[in-house]
Structures are given as C-alpha cells and as structure tokens.
Amino acid sequence: MSAQTRILGHILHAYGRRFRLAKGSHPITLTFSVTSRCQSRCLTCHIGDKSRKGHFKDKPDLSLDEIEKIFKSLGKLYFFNVSGGEPFLRSDLPDIVELAIEHLKPGIIHIPTNALAPGPIEKGCREILQKIRKRNIKIPLTVKPSIDGLGDLHDKIRGVRGNFEKLEETIIRLKLLEEEFPEFHLELGTVISRYNIGQLSEIEDYVHTLGVQSYRNEIAEERAEFFNKGDGIAPSAELYEKVIQRFAEEIRRHVGKKRPLTRLTESLRLTYYEFAVKILKKRTQVIPCYGGISNLHLNYNGQLWPCCVLGYDKPLADLRDLNYDVQRAMKTPQARAILDFIRKKGCYCPLANQWYSNILLNPLALARVILNYFFIDLRRKRA
Ligand code: SF4
C-alpha cells in the first residue's frame, strides 16, 4: 500500500472518530517518550530533574515486553516519533525501534537528542540503520540534535557546561553517517524561548554554514510533560510573529530551487507558522484539534496521552492497568471524556506535530497549503 493511500486511510478514520462514526484507535502519529532520564537541565524543561514538584519519580520505563504488547495493540501508523528525556540513554533504543518497525510499520522515524553523548548517539543510530537495512526496507530515519544558542548561550539554556562542544562533535559524526546511509537525515532544531529570541538569526546562519539541510524550530511551551508551568518561558505572540515572519521569508527565498516534496513540506510549514501565530493571539483552537485521535503520545511510564501538552493533567489511560491494550483504553469513560474536552475546545496550543496533522485534516487549511505551494515565490516577490 502506498504512503498516500495509508495516510488517506488514517485521515478518514480520524474524521470518523471525531464525528463518532468510527471506533478504536488508528493514529497517523505516535510519539513515544522512551525514558524520563536526561542529563540536561534546561531552562525550558525539567523532565530530567526528579527533584521537581509533582515529578513521577518511582515509575520505571516501559520494558521491551511491555512496549511490544502496546505496539501490537496499536497497529500500523505513519510517523513514529521518539521522545524523552534523552532517548539515547536507553541502550535498547535500537530494539525499541525494531519493535516499532515490526508492529507499527512506520513510514518515517524521527528521534531528537540533547547531543551530550556523541559516541553512544552515533552507535545507536548506526545500529538502528543496520536493523532497517537488514530488513531490506526503506524507512527514512531523521535525528535532530537540539541547538538552542551558540557557545555559552547554548550551555546556559541547556544547563550543562560543554554541551555546545559535544553538539559540534555529534554533528560531525552524524554528517559522516549521512554519507554512509542515504536513508539517514540529520536535522537541527531550536526551541524558541525568551532566552534565545535575540540570537535566532545567528543560530540560523550557523546552521547554514554547517551545510545541514533541515532546520526546524518550535516555540517554547509550558506543558504538564515538562513540569514548567508558570515558568513564563515563551516569548509573546507579537514577538513570535516577528520572528516567524523572518523564518517564513527565508523559506520563500530558498524554496524555488528545492525539489517538489521539499517545496510541499515547506508550504505545510508556512501554513503551520500562520496558524501558530493565530492560535497564540486568539488563545483558542483556530481549527479543530485531533489530539488523541490523529496523534497519540505514549509516556515512558505506560500512560497514554492525547498530547504532551495535556500530558499528566489529562491522561487517556494507564496502559499498565489495561493489559497494554490501546484499543481498550480508548473505549474507557476517561478517554471519551478527554476527547470530548478537546472537541469542545477546552484547550489550545501551537504544538507543531499535532498541528501539522490538524492542517492535513482540515480542508480549508489544506487548501491554504496548496496555495502556499503554488504561490510561495509570488508572495515573496510581493513582500
Ligand atoms: S490543542 Fe494543544 S493541548 Fe489541546 S489537544 Fe490539541 S495539542 Fe493538546
């Protein structure tokens, strides 16, 4: 079955779930926080700091056996996003990805990293790529080290002295891996917060000098998952809009020479930026959110979430109590109540991976992506 047909199947199911015509769970995307362990002590996230109030200290990470049961009950999806803590702290990460390939049959695998352990990160990536090759299948693997500043600013935001040097070493190692494995893609990512909003141009210029093809950024958010509520880390909507306009202009400037697929991705990104600004200004879901339907988040402790923003505050279920059965979990009154809460716009946020799905699921938003695709250069010339 082609990727397009599979995504179409997921989209139809998501419509069905939203209008209560379909049952069960058939998400496009699963994000799996494989561990809460992390060596970083970021100003924007306290997952690795077990001394934080409300932190779930005593729950072990899901074992491989537990993970396999969950994946089996979930079935096929398209995007498999690994998250953490720091994913590469789990030495069995390649086995987790192998289980995902076996049971979820993802079309794309994505892993972020804090880049603090260049050797083990390279080793983990190589093992995953070898497992993919051994199966004789083609699944793109993207690994995204974080870059939140240059030099000392990066170390300050990430809370670890010497982090920037480790990041540079990680980039060199992963770029060499890219030459060896064409299905491997290195990208870099920045969380835009009030700590680095003044240095974003320098970061972007630096990324371009490295020759890294893909660079993503996301606005810092206060989430139950990060134990950072009330920290005031996000820039204002107005400031964010200014930054985003500049990023959008950069995309328009470079998009002309890019391949059709990249152009389509960039059009989707532009549309997301437009929505993110509107969401922050209007403080509501400006189009319906399919959190818990199109996307699911599995936490390291077996909790199933509609998204990482609601996270511990509104878990759909604890899969350890439900025999690791996602389909059963989605039928519980608790899960139904939370999906209702989201449907009635009880929450809002600009969470990027959820909003990419929301855009795909909204005909008007999708039309906007298509407009951006065809008129991307024209809009630049007029600007
Ligand atoms: S709007 Fe944000 S907080 Fe609400 S369900 Fe969607 S992703 Fe989660």
Image: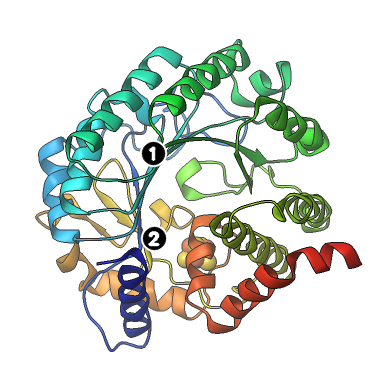
Image side of residue 35 versus residue 366, left or right: left
> How many C-alpha atoms fall within 10 Å of the one at disc 2: few (<14), some, or many (≥20)?
many
Under mark 1, the amino acid is Glu
Helix, strand or loop status at disc 1: loop
Which residue sits at x=74%, y=49%? Answer: 254
**How far apart, in angstroms, are the residues tagged by discs 2 and 1?**
37 Å
Residue 183 disc label: 1
Residue farthest to the right, as pictured: 382
Q: Label 2, on which residue?
A: 314
Question: In the depicted view, which residue is nearer to us: 74 or 214?
Answer: 214
Under mark 2, the amino acid is Lys
Q: Earlier in the sequence, mark 2 or mark 1?
A: 1
Is residue 283 visible to the viewer in this orientation of the structure? no
Tell me if residue 258 comes above or below residue 336 in the rendering. above
Helix, strand or loop status at disc 2: loop
Dividing the picture into quarters, in which one does residue 327 lie? bottom left
Question: x, y percentage for residue 252?
Answer: 76, 56
Tell me if residue 215 comes above or below residue 290 in the rendering. above
User: In which quadrant of the rendered image does the C terminus lie?
Assistant: bottom right
Question: In the depicted view, which residue is nearer to us: 318 or 205?
Answer: 205
Image side of residue 195 versus residue 1, left or right: right
Dividing the picture into quarters, in which one does residue 329 lie? bottom left
Question: x, y percentage for residue 233?
Answer: 68, 42
> How many C-alpha atoms fall within 10 Å of the one at disc 1: few (<14), some, or many (≥20)?
some
Task: Please name which of the two marks, 2 or 1, marks the residue nearer to the observer.
Answer: 1
Image side of residue 26 versus residue 141, left or right: left
Is residue 159 visible to the viewer in this orientation of the structure? yes
Which residue sits at x=35%, y=77%? Answer: 14
Dividing the picture into quarters, in which one does residue 79 lie? bottom left
Question: x, y percentage for residue 8?
Answer: 36, 75
